[in-house]
Amino acid sequence: MTDHEAIVERLKAVQKASRGIVALDTEAINGMLLELADRIPAAAASILAANRQDLDRMDPADPRYDRLLLNEARLESIASDIRNVAALPSPLDQVLEERALPNGLEVKKVTVPLGVVGIIYESRPNVTFDVFSLCLKSGNATVLKGGSDAACSNIAIVGLIQQVLADRGLDPDIIYLLPAEREAAHVMLNAVGFIDVIIPRGSQQLIDFARKHSTVPVIETGAGIVHTYFDRSGDLEKGKAIVFNAKTRRPSVCNALDTLIVHSDRLAALPELVAPLTEKMVQIFADEPAFFKLSGIYPQELLDMASPEHFGTEFLSLKMSIRTVDSLDEALEHIAHHSSKHSEAVIAEDQEVIEAFMKRVDAAAVYANSSTAFTDGAQFGLGAEIGISTQKLHARGPMALKELCSYKWLVNGNGQVRPA
């Protein structure tokens, strides 16, 4: 049997397992999730040892290193997120619409699982836990294709999940981790009839690869080219805190700030606005007006003149560009040209500016006077997330339980037939 054939056989097993999930009641699903969360501390040593093998192969200066890193605190947070998912109401069997037709038919539209959800992702072993918990809670089986960077971590995590499934009398094929080799991704992306939807999580390159090569429907998530516009009416103290948090909290994640847009009337405040960034040694690429305003104030070794490629770039590191504009319209035009439609923010006290920005910016999450770091399923009260959808069909923004459901129509009759 070839590797391709072996993968297809496993996918058939996952598809079969997915049909069994819908027979599970909410209590059984929640019990599985709670036991998994409870067993993470006991498995921490083996998971962290596997994660260390992955980390040892990566340069700590690589922006992906922080995404790959697991530690006891992060495992505790993962366990907490799993418990949060277990505590959420089930998204299944919810009646979305119902009506009685004049012919006596009773029609209901109810939520159902998507079926088999395929996730292709890079350097994020925490995603393995998040995806499984959300998929199981929403009645879906899970096929995972992680990157080779996190191969050891993912094997350890999926091994724990499958052990808990088996111990509770559930089918371990509810979750399947594909081989780390790139060739396995091509099998996954073309597994029509076995996988119902593909969700890529990672770089724009990964998302483009999935969209280009997949014959299975794809929901795009991940890439975040994020802007914050500091208006002429912006409050400086709010702005300092927001810009610092959005850029430095976790610079390697998709909701981190990439470009600060500043109204030209507030250039005098720019040095103070970005002063906190020196604490984290943030490299700034500034357009000409901003560069000359910061010269001699912001550390010289951290300040460069911006080039066109510094705008529309997802840095995923302690780097940021600055663009100066003369109006809200110019700021909106810059965002429209460079945004990945992930998260965008305005800092302003002028309510008309806030309302115009919120209405006219086309993005999954739009903020007024707040950090874009909040674009996250758990922060939005969704328990956890599969990813941040940047498209408009089916799901947009943080995808969680409801977004992992479709629906079907249930029609009850009493012998009705349709007239010729």
Image (cartoon, rainbow, N blue to C red):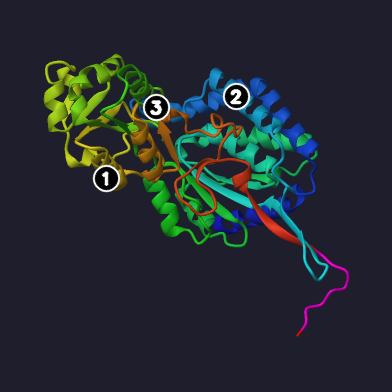
Q: Quadrant of residue 411?
A: bottom right
Q: Can residue 341 be seen at all in this image of the molecule?
A: no
Asked which secondary structure carries label 3, the reply is loop
State how far apart marks 1 and 3 are (Cα). 20 Å
Which is more N-terminal, label 3 or label 1? 1
From the viewer's side, name the closer residue of 150 and 211.
211
From the viewer's side, name the closer residue of 43 and 192.
192
Where is residue 153? Give x, y as percent. 54, 32
The answer to whether 242 appears left or right of 45 in the picture is left
Mark 3 neighbour density, 10 Å: few (under 14) some (14–19) many (20 or more): some
Q: Quadrant of residue 59?
A: top left
The answer to whether 10 appears left or right of 308 in the picture is right
The chief SS type of the magenta part is loop
Asked which secondary structure carries label 2, the reply is helix
Which residue is depicted at the point 63% across and 52% down? 116
State how far apart marks 1 and 2 are (Cα). 50 Å
Mark 2 neighbour density, 10 Å: few (under 14) some (14–19) many (20 or more): some
Over which residues does the magenta segment extend?
Answer: 412-419
Where is residue 52? Give x, y as percent. 49, 24
Give above or below for 198 relative to 409. above
Which residue is depicted at the point 80% across and 39% down? 169
Which is more N-terminal, label 2 or label 1? 2
Give above or below for 66 relative to 137. above
Label 3 sits on residue: 369
Q: Quadrant of the N terminus?
A: bottom right
Kindly identify the amino acid type of the residue bearing the numbered disc 2.
Answer: Ser
Residue placed farthest to the right in the image? 414
Label 1 sits on residue: 333
State how far apart marks 3 and 2 are (Cα). 43 Å
Kindly identify the amino acid type of the residue bearing the numbered disc 1.
Answer: Glu
